[in-house]
Image (spheres, grey):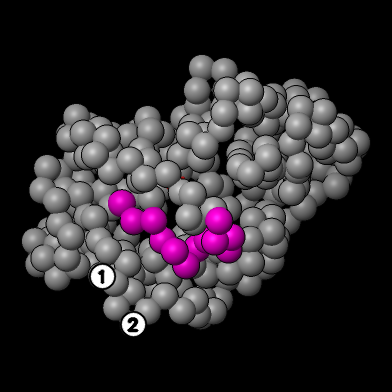
Amino acid sequence: MIIFKKADDIQFFLKDKAALTGFVPTMGALHSGHISLINASRQANAYTVCSIFVNPVQFNDPKDYDKYPITIEKDILMLEQAGCDILFLPSVHEIYPQGTQLEKKYNLGYLETVLEGKYRPGHFQGVCMVIDRLLSIVTCSNLYIGQKDYQQCMVIKKLVELKNLQLSVNVNICATLREKDGLAMSSRNMRLNEDERKKAVTIYQVLEYLKKNYTAENLKQLKSNAEEMLKENGFKPDYVEIADAENLSAISEWDGKAKIVALVAAFLNEVRLIDNMVLN
Ligand code: AMP
């Protein structure tokens, strides 16, 4: 695996290879979920590039940024073993030579006002800033992102449209990888202690509960039951929502046709976890 730290160097290397390149942007602390994206890219592209960059401008909570796990040696080993071809490992200055001032310049509309957008102001502008910059450096024809971050997938698709890249960059959304008990793999899981780790599975159980029990009329009651289940297991929920899977508008009465998705975000002490499940 070749490791690049400078934007100019990787850009030069990838020149003329965009049509052969798949790209997996990450913030490191890699787990099998990330590696599943590397595998998906390797199956369809001659070159697979992974980036590891903990993006300061997408953290609305500075404590969350300071505590974000960094396991770079292990990450490099995992990527080597997975057969990743290229790792881009830039510094903050390399990505933001003009500084890290968050600019509100991407018109994400409604998407930015709900769920993660509402609870993490500025977060998606920060995501767009970094993906915009990364896509200008790592020229590729396939981008791989995880359904684990459902709303982020929609934001990145929107960004690709806003930048008029939809004809040159394919956005591939990959399924969420889970631990044996169902907990969605996440770099933040490393921050859970033993007791918290046991309780963390409640989020998955809540999603399964919603999937098994939803009907056209009972969504409001189900969401309220789900919040109670989370609270009983030590969580402080930000939201439990059932939304239209295409546009994320909240649904209180299901018409029996629309594709719907359940989304949960909740704190377990200091650690904020998110997960989602398409219900139909
Ligand atoms: P992150 O390092 O958390 O920014 O994640 C990098 C990419 O990996 C994003 O596209 C995530 O959606 C994706 N990802 C994170 N967790 C999982 C998972 N459990 N399964 C599949 N993809 C994931």
Residue 94: numbered disc: 1
In this picture, residue 135 sits left or right of residue 224: left
Is 232 contained in the magenta span? no
In this picture, residue 206 sits left or right of residue 33: right
> Which picture quadrant has residue 211?
top right
Which residue is pictured at 44% across the width and 64% down the height? 56
User: Around disc 2, counting alpha carbons within 10 Å, would you say few (fewer than 14), some (14 to 19), or many (20 or more)?
Assistant: few
Residue sitting at the far top: 180
In this picture, residue 74 sits left or right of residue 182: left
Secondary element at image label 2: loop
User: Around disc 1, counting alpha carbons within 10 Å, would you say few (fewer than 14), some (14 to 19), or many (20 or more)?
Assistant: some
Q: Position of residue 126 (x, y in %)?
A: 49, 67
Which residue is pictured at 47% across the width and 67% down the height? 57
Q: Position of residue 172 (x, y in %)?
A: 39, 47
From the image, tell me which residue sits under label 2. 98
Q: Amino acid at mark 2?
A: Gln
> Which picture quadrant has residue 104?
bottom right
Q: Position of residue 15 (x, y in %)?
A: 11, 65
Q: Is residue 123 visible?
A: yes
Q: Amino acid at mark 1?
A: Glu
Quarter of the image where the C terminus is located = top right
Provide the residue span drawn in magenta. Answer: 52-63
